[in-house]
Image (cartoon, grey):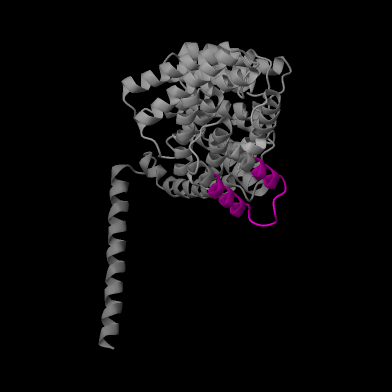
């Protein structure tokens, strides 16, 4: 629906501009353009729809637009706008394949009359629909659409030099690059993967060079995707430096602490002692500077996990305990408290761990951590029972009895007792059979 509404308002603006241009040029009026007549009627009815299902409204206008397009071959800017709106309606109705075909038709017709802006709009939508989640286009076709989209947006920006053109060019660069980064999985052939990532880095660098004034994605977001591409390419120090740049920027889109953590992940193996030290320094600097960042609680949990994974259970417990209650999410607080209990248990303090598990259950009874704490509590108690049982054998095992002879005597007595019990059981069943 978002795409349809966006297209609708664009179309209203285009209709108004077209009307002014036609009046000034002395060309045929809006009333003489069959496409524009129908589009204007659609706009009017869209503004004041009749009560009922909007799906019926869209299906009606889908059929109206299809009939108008198939009944006239003349290509005009208003026909291209009708194709754009038809594609949006089809997409809203869940007809992705039809929508893709409509935008491909719009692309061909826009190219035929040199309508650069409409060409960019058509390729923008065809690019979105050619992604792997729709399974409409094969890899070769999707790659061709990607490159055509970037090229058309670049041509439009170079010719128009308008804010709209530069915005669409920036959007094309970031959209295509981010798709390449996300789709460059490790199951892809190494050569193809590197080629995609190299292309993404090239496009993102161009988007960054455009500056912050254009596009729907902030400069920080473009740098974030660039760092991700560099990291996937194995250029880890370069990626870390870009994350550091984002952290130093005055922006609200991306947490500075998160960017510093990502930089540390590029420089050190995650959950290694070096990684834990880096996180400790990040948090210490943050506290020293009096910083405020919503990601702080999450970062403290990451630090606790780093200590936990490296066996530094005392440090892990201290971090998890301090982090408990600091988050706005009860789920996060419950999890931190649970991890505190796990750290205590693995650190050899089972009694303290039991108390913490009970506290998780008491304070956060409906959380997943409470269920996990119940399981862990039972496990600790089972371990204690096992330890109590084994302790009865410790004097013999430790050589505090009469040594080997005593152990043999105990074993013989156990065997004799078991045999006697089996004999009684056999006689009992025999008597029942005779009765």
Q: How many marks?
A: 0
Classified by dominant secondary structure, the portion drawn in magenta counts as helix
Viewer-proximal residue, 320 or 79? 79
Residue 112: percent from left, percent from top: 46, 26
Task: Report the side of 189 relative to 364 (left or right).
Answer: left
- The residue at 51%/26% (across/down) is 119
Q: Is residue 271 visible?
A: no
- The residue at 49%/11% (across/down) is 238
Image quadrant containing the C terminus? bottom left
Which of the 4 image quarters holds residue 323? top right
Image quadrant containing the N terminus? top right
Q: Is residue 34 visible?
A: yes
Residue 299: percent from left, percent from top: 60, 26
Position of 32 relative to 118 (above/below): below
Which of the 4 image quarters holds residue 399? top left
Q: Does the segment drawn in magenta span residue 102?
A: no
Which of the 4 image quarters holds residue 298? top right
Position of 357 relative to 103 (above/below): below
Viewer-proximal residue, 279 or 70? 70
Viewer-proximal residue, 99 or 252? 99
Q: Which residues are magenta?
A: 40-65
Residue 63: percent from left, percent from top: 53, 49
Residue 153: percent from left, percent from top: 52, 20
Position of 266 relative to 124 (above/below): above
Viewer-proximal residue, 319 or 77? 77
């Amino acid at each position: 629906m978002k795409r349809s509404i966006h297209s609708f308002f664009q179309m209203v603006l285009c209709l108004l501009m077209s009307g002014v241009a036609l009046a000034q040029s002395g060309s045929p009026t809006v009333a003489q353009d069959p496409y524009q007549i129908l589009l204007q009627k659609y706009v009017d009815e869209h503004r004041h729809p009749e009560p009922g299902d909007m799906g019926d409204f869209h299906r009606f206008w889908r059929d109206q637009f299809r009939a108008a397009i198939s009944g006239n071959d003349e290509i005009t800017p208003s026909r291209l706008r009708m194709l754009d709106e038809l594609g949006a309606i089809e997409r809203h109705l869940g007809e992705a394949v039809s929508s893709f075909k409509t935008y491909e038709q719009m692309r061909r017709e826009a190219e035929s009359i040199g309508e650069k802006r409409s060409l960019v709009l058509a390729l923008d939508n065809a690019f979105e629909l050619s992604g792997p989640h729709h399974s409409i286009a094969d890899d070769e076709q999707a790659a061709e659409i990607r490159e055509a989209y970037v090229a058309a947006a670049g041509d439009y920006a170079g010719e128009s030099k308008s804010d709209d053109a530069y915005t669409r060019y920036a959007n094309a660069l970031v959209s295509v690059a981010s798709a390449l980064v996300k789709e460059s999985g490790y199951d892809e052939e190494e050569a193809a993967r590197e080629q995609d990532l190299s292309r993404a880095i090239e496009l993102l660098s161009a988007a960054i060079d455009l500056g912050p004034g254009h596009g729907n994605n902030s400069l920080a977001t473009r740098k974030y995707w660039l760092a991700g591409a560099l990291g996937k390419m194995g250029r880890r120090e370069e990626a870390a430096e870009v994350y550091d740049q984002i952290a130093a920027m005055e922006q609200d889109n991306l947490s500075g602490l998160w960017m510093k953590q990502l930089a540390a992940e590029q420089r050190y193996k995650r959950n290694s002692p070096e990684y834990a030290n880096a996180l400790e320094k990040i948090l210490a600097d943050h506290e020293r500077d009096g910083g405020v960042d919503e990601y702080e609680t999450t970062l403290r949990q990451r630090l606790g996990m780093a200590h936990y994974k490296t066996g530094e259970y005392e440090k892990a417990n201290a971090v998890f305990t301090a982090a408990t209650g600091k988050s706005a999410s009860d789920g996060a607080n419950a999890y931190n408290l649970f991890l505190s209990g796990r750290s205590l248990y693995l650190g050899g303090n089972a009694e303290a761990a039991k108390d913490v598990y009970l506290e998780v259950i008491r304070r956060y009874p409906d959380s997943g951590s409470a269920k996990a704490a119940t399981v862990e509590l039972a496990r600790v108690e089972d371990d204690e029972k096992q330890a109590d049982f084994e302790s009865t054998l410790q004097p013999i095992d430790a050589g505090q009895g009469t040594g080997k002879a005593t152990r043999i005597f105990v074993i013989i007595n156990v065997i004799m007792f078991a045999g006697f019990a089996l004999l009684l059981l056999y006689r009992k069943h025999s008597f029942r059979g005779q009765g």
